[in-house]
Amino acid sequence: MEFNAEHFNADHFSLFDLPPAFRLDAALLDRRYLELQSQIHPDRFASASEAERRHSLQWATRVNEAYQTLKKPLSRAKYLLHLAAHDIGSESNTLMPVDFLIEQMEWREAVAEVRAAGEHHELEHLHHRLKRDLLERYEEIAMLLDDQPDLEQAADRVRRLMFLEKLLVEIDEAMAALEE
Amino acid sequence: MALLQIAEPGESAAPHQHRLAVGIDLGTTNSLVATVRSGLAVVISDELGRPLLPSVVRYLPDGNCDVGYEAQARQAIDPRNTIASVKRFMGRGLQDIVQREALPYLFDEGPGMLRLNTVAGRKSPVEVSAEILRVLRLRAEASLGGPLVGAVITVPAYFDDAQRQATKDAARLAGLPVLRLLNEPTAAAVAYGLDNASEGTYAVYDLGGGTFDISILRLSRGIFEVLATGGDSALGGDDFDHRIFCWLLEAAQLKPLSVEDARMLLTRAREAKEYLTFHGVAPINARLNSGEVVDLTLTTEIFAEITQTLVAKTIQPVKKALRDAGLSVAEVKGVVMVGGATRMPQVQRAVGDFFRQEPLNNLDPDKVVAIGAATQANLLAGNGLGGDNWLLLDVIPLSLGLETMGGLVEKIIPRNSTIPTARAQEFTTFRDGQTALAVHVVQGERELVSDCRSLARFELRGIPPMVAGAARIRVTFQVDADGLLAVTAREQTVGVEASIVVKPSYGLSDDEIAGMLKDSMLHVRDDALRRALKESQTDAQRLIEAVRSAIDTDGELLSVEERSRIEHDVSNLQAALLGDNRRQIMLAMDDLEADTKDFAARRMDKSIRRAFSGRHINELDSEVAAARTGEHA
């Protein structure tokens, strides 16, 4: 990018002119995102020159990436840790506390069981239970990132969150599999 | 060139000049072309006043072809050479076509895509579709009185990359500049949304002749944001005809049929289906070439019963799309019905039951997609007035990924990602001294490569020999606003690069297109070269106008030298315009474009700054900026 590389390379929060924090005004993010896309989306340059279409493509791509990252709590938390240059480690090579792992195993067994029994309703129930659980964990992460910053603890909670979000995907996939 | 005009998005630099643009619904059964006339989107009918063009092409022994009603009327007597529902073959190989035996065509394997052997030679589905598009282009040009600057062509939202690329190739072959490939449900939403000024979350249920799409959209302040999409690109009204056909065979206890008899009965089946939309029972009478006589009555009850599984098959993708969007049925404000097949009462009922509300039917389901496409084409061509500042944000329907060790798929871009989008992933070598890496691009949701669609294969060569795991190969996927993918692989330590616009394994190569274009020139009378010259002249004039108006508004962004260079380029281009040498015009345009590139960039910058006016975008926290290590592709 030769024009305004500074803006293009700004961090995701600056791109939307939002404070870098986990707690985020989602409606404001949505609005800023749509404002930006309205300016630079390729549809605004459909009959423009090759070079201009490329610029617009790169910018719209950049804005989409930033929006997707900030919109979801897990990716937002990971991104904040990344901005703070704090390595969260990967879920596979980091030792998790035993009680957390046991809890995870129980969740997974429950999912496997209701899936095998073909109980769609039970899966929905697990889905909602997990969603509620996730909301509590987001609040915890907000405290550790925004209120009384403790990056070490925050990274630990984010690693746990990665397990849980993956579990949610598995539950959704199990529901889809049952429907087919 | 329009970047020079971006200062006022949505406003044309030369408002007096209306650029001719159309929207085309290239359907499985019927196709339509529409345009915006005096601010109103209308379907352009043929000289007999018929809005639809049956998507049927009949090849003739002299190499020419008939398209539309004429071809459709001969379907029963010349089934082999009369290609119907070609959309089902777009970007598809032979093994993809189910019930191939039931179809009367002489199929052949071809590079990338199947071929059809006809009396006029071997045809690819792209060529057949191009014939349909060409007729629509000529219809529009005759009606509008000039060459088109471009078309928005609709595709099922659930079309994969190969099917989209094939559609774009067909347009090229038909001499139609493509402004955008637009998803059919999104086009329908535009037609509805702009009409009804609605806000909220809507579902678009689009059951066409051969494809089924479901899209969940959020409409707010002129922005149509697709939240999730799903469907089945091989399920449509045709399948309902086929169910009736099978019921006929069984009920009348017919012997194996000739191709002609089969074609005729399929036509009778379709007629019965359409009749049942307004009547309780449909009589089916036919005398076959074999001498057998069919005399049966199909009731709505039997019809609903034999098609129950088809209707149920559309509800699964609806559930999945809702889940992907994170929404419940209760959060859907309205359900828009699109496609002729949604006229069937059992479909209306099933959708109404599922969403617990009456589906919306106030626009003609046959026309709504073309109308939406025309509206979008008008905007993209720069004819939009100040108020028409709406925007579409669409998604890719299927995940894109790469083959990794053991035939597994590593997803790079998940389905329902808003486009345009890009994602990069790093890979490494697994053998000592490995100097090449094979890249296999696939699309689909399954974990095994063999269950997904193969889009392209290419190789990154020239990796310096290193120990296994030392090379760092960054593979970048970029999906543009048409939903088309380009892939780049780059070795990071020495910088060797390989890239591909995904088409060779399922689309056509550029050489093939060039060859076909040459062939089609022999048959088509309109003078492509003169047309091209005319287009370049128009483009050049537009460019000059745009540059002038940009200098008028933002001349202060230029230095004296830059300005005089640009003015020099402008007079060169004007000189070239006096002659009829297209190449000279193009070269002069290139110079002008090159010399205004920085200017355009500065103007864009200014425009974006204005979007943030008063919000201090440049006050970056330098530490934060330094900590960023190039996360995005």
Image (cartoon, coloured by chain):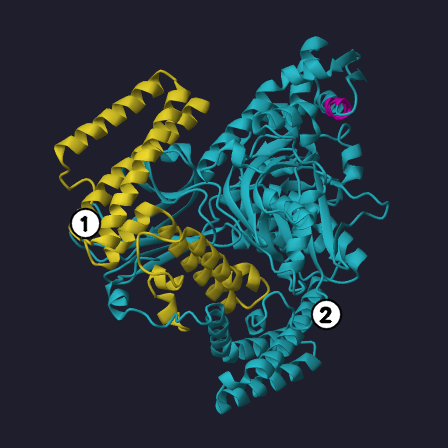
User: Please, which chain is the residue tagged with disc 2 on?
Assistant: B
Residue extending farthest right: B48
Please say whether residue B557 is visible from this viewpoint: yes
Residue lying at 49% horizontally and 71% vertically, measured from the top left: B610
Q: Which residue is mark 1?
A: B469
* Quarter of the figure that contains the C terminus of chain B: bottom left
Locate residue B441 relative to residue A45 in the image: left or right: left
Percent position of residue B426, x then y: 28, 51
User: Would residue B262 be found to the left or right of residue B312 on screen?
Assistant: right
Q: Looking at the rendered structure, which numbered label has been put on residue B17?
A: 2
Nearer-the-camera pick, B631 or B171 = B631
Q: Which chain is yellow?
A: A
Give me the residue at 67% from left, 10% from top: B250
Amino acid bearing label 1? Gly
Quadrant holding the N terminus of chain B: bottom right
B294 over B34 or under it: above or below:
above
Q: Position of residue B369 (x, y in %)?
A: 67, 44
Which residue is the extreme one toward the front? A147
Looking at the magenta stretch, what is its main secondary structure? helix
Range covered by the magenta-colored residues: B269-276
Q: Earlier in the sequence, mark 1 or mark 2?
A: 2
**Residue B326 is inside the magenta segment:** no
Q: Position of residue B41 (x, y in %)?
A: 73, 52
- Where residue B423 sits: x, y (%)? 37, 52
Instruction: Report the amino acid beneath label 2.
Output: Gln
